[in-house]
Image: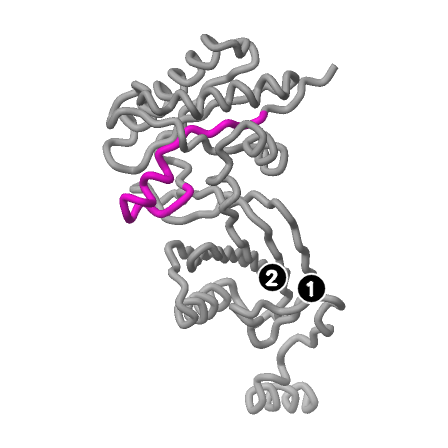
Amino acid sequence: MNSIRALAFIALLFPAAAQTVLEPDAPGCVDSRVVSKLQFCRIDNCEKKDSDHRDIPVREDEKGEAIVSAVDGDSRSLMYECSVSVSPSDVVRQSAAALRAAGFDVPYQFVDKEGTLTAHKGDTWISLEAASRFYTLVEMKATSELESATDAVAMAEAVERYGHVPAYGVQFLSGRADLTPESAVALREIVAMMEDNSDWRVRVVGHTDNLGAKDANMTLSMRRATTVVNWLALHGVKRARLEVAGAGDSEPVAPNDSEANRAKNRRIEIVKLPTPTQ
């Protein structure tokens, strides 16, 4: 009994002594230069991935549900293990403060029994998820390759690498599903891409910015995707190789905080479908 009291007394005087004893960082793993590991935590694992794709929460809708943004690029993930005294709230709060001090914008932050945080600066994105006494930090360098893929070969390479490609050259009249005359150039490149890859099936997905009502945006995105599918079918792509979908404003690739960013979100995406099993 006396020994237990003595240990409790030591823990009160020296809180660090009461922390869980953790192993050293995993060999070969280097801590983040943006958000250093928290006190009483260790790097448990790490991973690098080329051509990664992640859906990252960027804000909440009117119901409090997370709205995600698709980010493509090379990523580095760090998985941390902490002592039992470190909570998801601690992880999110301290990481958010460190990121803001480093000049990052933190558009999304959520804490309950688990915690989530998103931050970005320029083309660098940080995603953090915390649960129990573990948390994962993902650093992504968003690629500009997708935006610059405008010819059939570059678009096909992007589809092979990322599974999808935006066709920013396909433009519509404001608030309508009518193609602009200039869109024919980009549409012909999509036809050429499909001819060069005759075994592909794709889904044509329409996206909008967040101006206007959600239901109207969903309808408009579907109508625009349908217009593109009809154009492709009329110009030689078999209709059986094409699916159509509308996502409205639910999948932005940039914050809807400027006209330039909203223009990125107004887009047609070509998504490669899995090859049917024989």
Question: Is residue 195 rendered to the left or right of residue 67?
Answer: right
Amino acid type assigned to the residue bearing label 2 in the image: Phe
For the residue marked with disc 1, what is the amino acid? Asp
Query: Tag 2, which secondary structure?
Result: strand
What residue is rendered at 56% in x and 23% in y? 193
Please tell me which residue is depicted at 37% across the width and 55% down the height of the picture. 107
Question: What quarter of the picture does the N terminus occupy?
Answer: bottom right
As drawn, the label of residue 134 is 2
The percent coordinates of residue 224 (x first, y second) are 36, 21
Of the pair 151 and 32, the residue shown nearer to us: 151
Kindly check if marks 2 and 1 are in contact, taking CB atoms under 8 A apart as contact.
yes
| Among the two numbered marks 2 and 1 on one chain, the one whose residue lies closer to the N terminus | 1
Q: What SS does tag 1 mark?
A: strand
Q: Quadrant of residue 29?
A: bottom right
Crowding around mark 1 (Cα neighbors within 10 Å: few <14, some 14 to 19, many 20+) is: many
Q: Residue at x 57, y 36 (%)?
A: 158
Where is mark 1, residue-wise?
Answer: 44
**Looking at the image, residue 85 lies above or below residue 204:** below
The magenta region covers: 253-272
Say above or below: 196 vs 124.
above
Q: Position of residue 231 (x, y in %)?
A: 42, 13
Quarter of the image that includes the C terminus: top right
The structure's colour scheme is one colour
Q: Within the image, what quadrant is residue 104 found in?
A: bottom left
**Is residue 263 highlighted in magenta?**
yes
Depth order, front residue of 247/236: 236
Q: Nearer the viewer, mark 2 or mark 1?
A: 1
Report the side of 273 relative to 116 (left or right).
Answer: right
- Residue 183 image position (x, y, % from top left): 37, 24
Residue plotted at (53% across, 44% down): 72
